[in-house]
Image: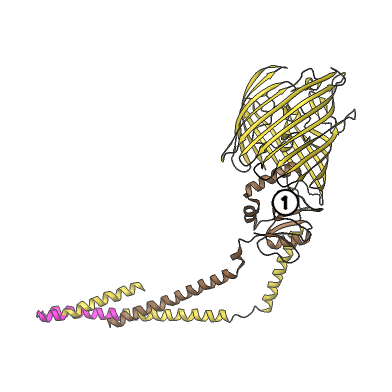
Chain colours: A yellow, B brown
Amino acid sequence: MSISIQRNFGALCLVGILAAGPCVASAEDASSDTVKVLQQRLEQSIKMIEALAARVQELEAKTAATSAAAATAVVVAGSQQPPAPAEAARLQAVEQQISQIETANAARQGDDSGLAVHGFADVNIGNHNPFHAYEKGASLNNLDLYLTPKLGDKWLALFELNFEVDHNGNFGVDVERAQLGYQFSDAATVWVGRFHTPYGYVNTAFHHGVWLNDSLRRPSFLMFEDQGGVLPAHTVGAWLTGGARGESGKVLYDAFAGNGQQIIGGLIDMRSGGNEHGKLIYGGRLGYQWTAGSFEGLSFGVNALDSKINDDQVPENLTDVRVAGAFAVYDTDTWEVVSEAYWFDNVNLYQGIGTHRSEAFFAQIGYRLPYFVPYARYERARLDQTDQYFAQQLTGGSYYRTAAGFRRDLNSKVAVKFEVANTHYTDRTVGEINEFLSQLAIRF
Amino acid sequence: MPAHIHISDRKSKRVAAFPLRRRAGLLRLAFLWLAALSPVAHADDLYVVCASSVTLAMADIRDVFLGEKQFAGPIKLVPVDNSAMQPDFLAKVMKMDAGKYTTAWTKKSFRDGFTPPSVKGADGEIVEFLKHTPGACGYLGSAPPPGLTLIGKL
């Protein structure tokens, strides 16, 4: 349209010029040749004007047709009839199908629609194995799977299956936790089976999920029994746990009893099939956790346990292991500060009769920056080597360790961690090692 | 003749442009009218709803959806997520993003054996679930039908 307007304007200018032309020519008495040329040009211009006029008419006709069509469409739309009976029936059937699908999906509560498997895994590379310091190089640690099948109503189940490398470098499979539970209320849940003994914070916060922990590993004395820990990390028995909520926090409690453990081959075994002497481990934990206000994220508590633990020596030792502990945790979006302390007051009942006192503690501080989490930890265990409970354990020696490291989350499921640590062994063997460790940890 | 051409040209421009403008204006009006009536205009509304038997305070909802509160009196609570409204719910009620919500449930599930809330696709499924599941709590983008307990509207 704009092109034709430009053409029209050009033609008008030309006509104007040409119209003025003869006057100028007559005034100057121009020659007849010039007049002839001008006449030819005038004829051409007139033809062009006629063509342009035809084009304008054509465009006007088209525009009128479009307007008419649009008007017709509006009229048709305005007078649209309801759908034919067949169409209505089809729509009704579709609506009914959608409603049925929604009902079916809503009714499907996942009870029998499969069981999700989640877990954790980690691979370590360093100048030492972080869990068995006498081994060096690359190492697999855990492939830890956990299942929480829905049993309906107030029933609960939790299974944690761990494929792990033992202290001999062999792969083994362990059912780390196998718990069946019933919830009476928020204040009381009873579990029976094999569970992580509720003491301190670390043992029931991270379990075998290395990814969950900001640091590369636990304090050595709080490792699991086959990785250097000196406490009975697993119990087979019954566990009552719950909490009471208040305005700004909640009181949390645990009480448990189970099979007394046994030291076999230098490692604490939780006697999943029962023990020979029928004696128990029992204990509890009491804590308070702030969930609101300026102390939100802070929790502290105390715990105690008593277990009759024998070993595989001839003649065997039997020790009444009496442990008291305390912990404090400050866990927020930015801070992770964890501290635990344990005091042992063991009584050797068969051999080395007498009371033996030992202690172990650690403190770790971490700060969650946007891109990484630096942390530092100090840990110390002063363990009486005349106490048969520690003397019979492969890793029952005293030590102190200073460690620093950081965690970097590569995405929401993959984290890489680095740690440098200096460890001094102070009694059973005397010496020190420096460790440079790295770890790739995932959850899925 | 030139004058005629000039007038015709302006007229043709008017004929071509005016209906277009008028149609655009009508479309705009229609859109605004539809938008005013459509639920999309209230997309910011979030209704926290529970099954009829459940009595809860809005302040409890965060704990319910983090597994920290499992019971309302003797009734076992069954939280259910609505994938269509979840970003809104996480921002307004849980005050966390989806990543943090998932991580919180990973820890909760691993530590305490609780299962994360099941996820439904839209309001219709949530309503059906709430109607048929005692103790169920969810959230909707539209007002709940009668027979459900409205815990709060955000």
Instruction: Answer above or below: position of A309 versus A14.
Output: above
Query: Which residue matches tag 1?
Result: B64
Where residue A434 appears, x then y in whole percent? Answer: 62, 22
Please, what is the three-letter code of the amino acid marked with disc 1? Answer: Val
Residue A55 visible at all: no
Instruction: Answer above or below: position of A90 versus B98.
Output: below
Magenta segment, prevailing SS (helix, strand or loop): helix
Instruction: Answer above or below: position of A36 versus B74.
Output: below
Which secondary structure, mark 1?
Answer: helix
Where residue B48 appears, x then y in whole percent? Answer: 69, 58
Residues in magenta, as a range: A22-50
Where residue A312 appears, x then y in whole percent? Answer: 84, 22
The chain containing the residue under callout 1 comes to B
Towards the viewer: A189 or A30: A189
Q: Is residue A81 left or right of residue A178?
A: left
Instruction: Answer above or below: position of B71 versus A76.
Output: above
- Extreme left residue here? A29
Towards the viewer: A369 or A393: A369
Towards the viewer: B121 or A123: B121
- Tell whether position A161 is magenta: no
